Image (cartoon, coloured by chain):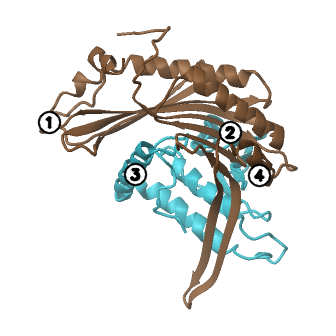
Amino acid sequence: MNISAPFPNLPNAPITEAIIDIVVNLTDDSSIEHVKSMKAELESDFPIFKELTSHHHEFKVSKEGLVQQYEEQSLIGYRFQSEERNEVVQLKSNGFTFNKLKPYSSWDEIFPIAMRLWAQYINILSPERVTRVATRFINQFKIPRQPFSNLGEFLHKPPAIPEAVPENIENFFSRVVTLDSDSGIGVTVTQSIRKSDEQDFLSIIFDIDTYKKVDYHPEDEAIKETLESLHEVKNKIFFNNFTDTTLERFQ
Amino acid sequence: MTSGICVIGSSSTLAVSEAAKYLDSIYCEIKAHNDESLILSQQKRNTEEALIDAVCDAVVDNWDGYGAKKINGKSYQYAMLFIEAMTPSIPIPDVSVDPDGEVCFIWYSHDRWLFSVSISGTGRLAYAGLFGRNEIHGNESFVDRIPDALHSFIKRVSTNSI
């Protein structure tokens, strides 16, 4: 099976979180605190504001016991969230992240929003270089809870049960990390099952993370082009890994 | 110290949803399960112990008596992530703290065959290598895996023998 572009838009796409992530190197003159000036500008769309901090605790122990403690908390960025709690933008000292939680609309809708916010981020912080770009789409959908051995009803590449092992699957976790050496695009696909809130159902999680190490100027159009390419790779993986029966559920 | 705590999620692109947190928790459980095996985790345990030993000696400024800065906390955190990312093919390095407070890993084969990686507080890897008459140096960013270039330099040092 090899479905290729153009891929259909799915009105009921099982995307529970879509992420656009850009990693940067800041110059020595940049300070993450400058991002706070964006608060007024973002407040109307993202009124929920939170500081992101990292904590570091050290201690030295000798034969006499605890000798020295040291604790440090540092600001690493800010998180802005929409009131409906389905869009988050994180502006950090090492990069920019836009999270779209369900309900997902479309790439054509969320990508321009993310790029507009990215433009504001680089305007404030003037990063030196972009070193990595990524998209990540976490899909989650329910299946009836029943003793089953054939996840092939839902996935084209379900986990293989080794010989002589009982076949009723209770749980599984699969993580595959690959790299296309021609394009430099890395892919991490994670699959798992989890219990659902509803007693008679389980959830399948299919997580597609596509990324590429780069060396771009922050205003280089190649950033958008690369993110678009990553999105296309994600689509190819998505549409080639679910059965027709499963895809019909997302129509 | 963070030894034994899962510091990397199931994916290198961090997410905030409940589904993502579930995947991270399962991934951490699996890593913890593997770490219970001495065989699977011995290399990382030994390197973590070497890192902790080095850091414990460098918790205050002028720890070496020559004005060295104390350990950079963020460099230490990235060093722990670096150890987590080490594959079994990477031999255990010598671990030290540089006078600027950054963690340094060194792989040494014999005279004029060595490779070092210093980890800054921003996750930048500054590397330098001496391979007989050849020298290299450069910088790479560390996100979640050790860059392929560094893998090859480490292998070059560790597989060279007189």
Query: Camera-side residue: A97 or B55?
Result: A97
Residue A51: % across, % down = 66, 57
Can residue B23 be seen in the rendering of this structure?
A: yes
- Which chain is indicated by disc 1? A
Residue A179: % across, % down = 53, 27
Q: Quadrant for the C terminus of chain A, please.
A: top left
Residue hosting label 4: A36
Q: Earlier in the sequence, mark 2 or mark 4?
A: 2
- Which chain is indicated by disc 3? B
Amino acid tagged 2: Val
> Measured along the vertical axis of the image, is residue B110 above or below residue A73?
above
Amino acid tagged 3: Ser
Mark 2 → mark 1, Cα distance in angstroms: 43 Å
Query: Camera-side residue: B108 or A172?
Result: A172
Query: What is the secondary structure assignment of the residue under circle 1?
Result: loop
Chain whose colour in the figure is cyan: B
Residue positioned 71% across, 35% down in the render:
A117
- Which chain is indicated by disc 4? A
Q: Earlier in the sequence, mark 4 or mark 1?
A: 4
Can residue B113 be seen in the rendering of this structure?
A: no
- Which mark, by number, is residue A146? 1
Residue B20: % across, % down = 44, 43
- Which mark, by number, is residue A23? 2
Label pair 2/4, CB-CB below 8 angstroms: no
Label pair 4/1, CB-CB below 8 angstroms: no
Q: Residue furthest bottom?
A: A64
Query: What is the secondary structure assignment of the residue under circle 4?
Result: helix
Residue positioned 81% across, 70% down in the render:
B68
Chain A shade: brown
Mark 4 → mark 1, Cα distance in angstroms: 51 Å
